[in-house]
Each structure stands twice: as structure tokens, then as C-alpha cells.
Amino acid sequence: MNVKFLKSSEKKKLLAELEERFGMTELPYLLFETGKERIRGFSGTMTKEEIIELGKIANVEIIGLYLIKRERNLRLGLDATHLFKEQINKNIIEINEKQVEEWLRGKNLDIVKESGVYAIEFGNDFVGCGISDGKKIINHIPKERRIR
């Protein structure tokens, strides 16, 4: 089983990075890291020990919700942008109807922003996070969740 639970100090550091990047102040979940630098959150009643035992017989990546990808910067997953939409108040790029259509089809956006990770907002909701390379916003919507 390739699961590492985040210690309290690691969670505090992670939250400090999320506050700096997105303005988030709460992360009320049991956090664990799985392969590919993915951080998942679990809010159920199982203990760490029970999750480890379950991991011996099943794929633990089905437990919890994929929240964050650790890259050079932290990038929120698509569901995390919805889950934390009330907390996200920094590094937001608002897009229009034409742009959201392109975004949901997996296209990059021709928006010039300083390099970094941004939450993409359309109307009153978020539609994921993108990474700016200084010339465009690179799309990270998973292929299976894109509009065809």
C-alpha cells in the first residue's frame, strides 16, 4: 500500500501554502498522500489504522476525495475547487461563456498572467485550476471529465 498520512506539522505547512495561494484557511479532513503526489481527504469515521488494514485488501485510492496535486506549486483538483469555493479568494481568473466552453473541452486559455497556479471561475462556480506559463493557462481537466 502506497499511502502516507500527513502529520499535523505537514498539514499546517500545506494549509499555509493553500492560504498564500488561494486564501484558504480550513482543511477539515484526514489527509493522506497517494502515488503521483496526490493528496486525498477523508472525512469518514474510519481510523488511520482501519484505513491501513483496508489498504491490505483493497485499493485505498477509492477512499476519500482527491484534493490536491503536489507539483512545483500546489494545484487543487477539480472537485476541491467546488468543495472549497467559499474559501478561495485569491489567484482567481474569471472567464466568459466562450472560454468556459473551450476550458471544459480541455483546451488551454489564451490569457496572459504571471506564472503560477490559478483557480478558474465561471459565474458563481469554479471549473478547476490551471497553470499559467506566462502566455496561456494550461488546462488540467481530466480527460474523462471533459465535454466531448
Image: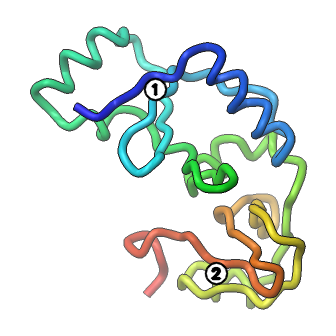
Q: How many marks?
A: 2
Q: Left of 110 or right of it: where is 43?
A: left
Residue 11 vs residue 62: left or right? right
Residue 76 place in picture, x, y as percent: 63, 51
Q: What residue did someone put label 2 on?
A: 103
Name the residue: 42% across, 18% down: 44
Where residue 86 appears, as percent x and y from the top left, is 80, 41
What residue appears at the point 10 percent right and 27 percent down from the top-left corner? 57
Q: Say above or below: 135 vs 129.
A: below
Above or below for 20 versus 58: below
Residue 105, quarter of the rendered image: bottom right
Q: Amino acid at mark 1?
A: Phe
Indicate the quadrant where residue 5 lies: top left
Q: Nearer the viewer, residue 9 or 24?
A: 9
The numbered mark at residue 42 is 1
| Residue situated in front as seen by the camera: 53 or 87 | 53
Q: Quadrant of the C terminus?
A: bottom left
- The kind of residue tagged 2 is Trp
Q: Secondary structure at mark 2?
A: helix
In the orientation shown, which residue stands out farthest toward the front? Answer: 72
Q: Position of residue 32 (x, y in %)?
A: 45, 29
Q: Residues within 10 Å of mark 1 (few under 14, many from 20)?
A: some
User: Which mark, by number, is residue 139?
Assistant: none
Crowd around label 2: few <14 · some 14–19 · many ≥20 (10 Å): many
Mark 1 lies on a secondary structure that is strand
Q: CA distance from mark 2 to mark 1?
A: 29 Å
For residue 79, side relative to residue 132 (left or right): left
Q: Is residue 137 above or below residue 110?
A: above
